[in-house]
Image: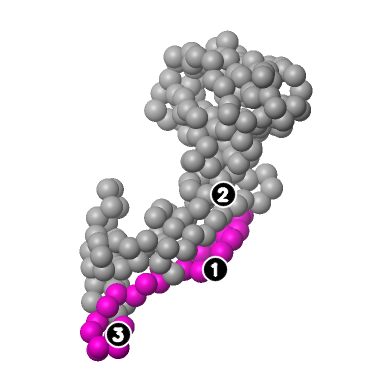
Amino acid sequence: MQHLRLAFGFLTVTKPILFMLNEGGIKQASNLCPDPGEPENGKRIGSDFSLGATVQFSCDEDYVLQGSKSITCQRIAEVFAAWSDHRPVCKVKTCGSNLQGPGGTFTSPNFPFQYDSNAQCVWVITAINNNKVIQINFEEFDLEIGYDTLTIGDGGEVGDPKTVLQVLTGSFVPDLIVSMSNQMWLHLQTDESVGSIGFKVNYKGSF
């Protein structure tokens, strides 16, 4: 068995290259990706690991997905097959809520005092009228810059990188943010160290 060493940004991995003989007796690389497994407290949808195949992931109730919701088996360096991204992880929600109605206000935990460390808070805002979009504006905003983040996405698929509208950090109060559908999600992630006061946000449905 031969091996190939590849560097992907910060990660360097050594992967075995599995060869097979074609009809002419010439060695060629395998067209199968390794089994990506399932995230703890979640599940994988799809069992086809061949080149070009896509598998999806979801989390159990009360857990939030971090990473790619779907990954694709693709050719790397013209010699072997590998997934387009790492398997995501499912982290337990520590706070947040589902919000509906014409409008309202919510805050980060303990606002205006310091929010909790190691928080995984999720809010999903839904306009009752499917023809409306969600508008949010922040009265106050202050997160530990570079370490604590508020990710805002369109729709109801929390954590899906393809739906992300903005990722916020620091103390700059954001401008008005508008969804493209009748749903919007917000995901607050904080680390184990220094925190800040967090945020206060108003939301409403709008045509």
Would you name the residue on which mark 3 appears?
Answer: 22
Give the number of the mark in front: 2 or 1. 1
Span shown in magenta: 20-49
Q: In this view, does 20 lie to the left or right of 129?
A: left
Q: Which residue is drawn at 41% across and 53% down?
A: 85
- Magenta stretch mostly in which secondary structure? loop
Dot 2 lies on which element? strand
For numbered disc 3, what is the local secondary structure? loop
- As rendered, which of 38 and 19 lies closer to the eye? 19
Asked if the residues shown at circle 3 and circle 1 are in contact, with their CB atoms under 8 angstroms apart, the answer is no
Residue position for label 1: 47
Tell me whether the residue at label 3 lies in contact with that at label 2, contact meaning CB atoms closer than 8 angstroms: no
Distance (Cα) linking label 2 and label 1: 20 Å
- The image shows residue 199 at horizontal and vertical percentages of 57, 18
Question: Relative to 77, is 158 above or below?
Answer: above
Q: Residue 14 carries which label?
A: none
Q: Which amino acid does label 3 sit on?
A: Asn
Q: Is residue 74 left or right of residue 150?
A: left
Q: Residue shown at 23%/64% (left/top)?
A: 5
Q: Earlier in the sequence, mark 2 or mark 1?
A: 1
Depicted 200 relative to depicted 5: above or below: above
Residue 46, position as x, y percentages in the image: 56, 64
Image marks 2 and 1: residues in contact by CB distance under 8 Å: no
What kind of residue is marked 1? Ser
Question: Which label's residue is closer to the chain start, 3 or 2?
Answer: 3
In front here: 110 or 34?
Answer: 34
Q: Nearer the viewer, mark 3 or mark 2?
A: 3
Q: How crowded is mark 1: few (under 14 residues within 10 Å), some or many (20 or more)?
A: few
How far apart marks 3 and 2 lie (CA) works out to: 41 Å
Q: Which of 59 and 184 is in front in this view?
A: 184
For the residue marked with disc 2, what is the amino acid? Cys
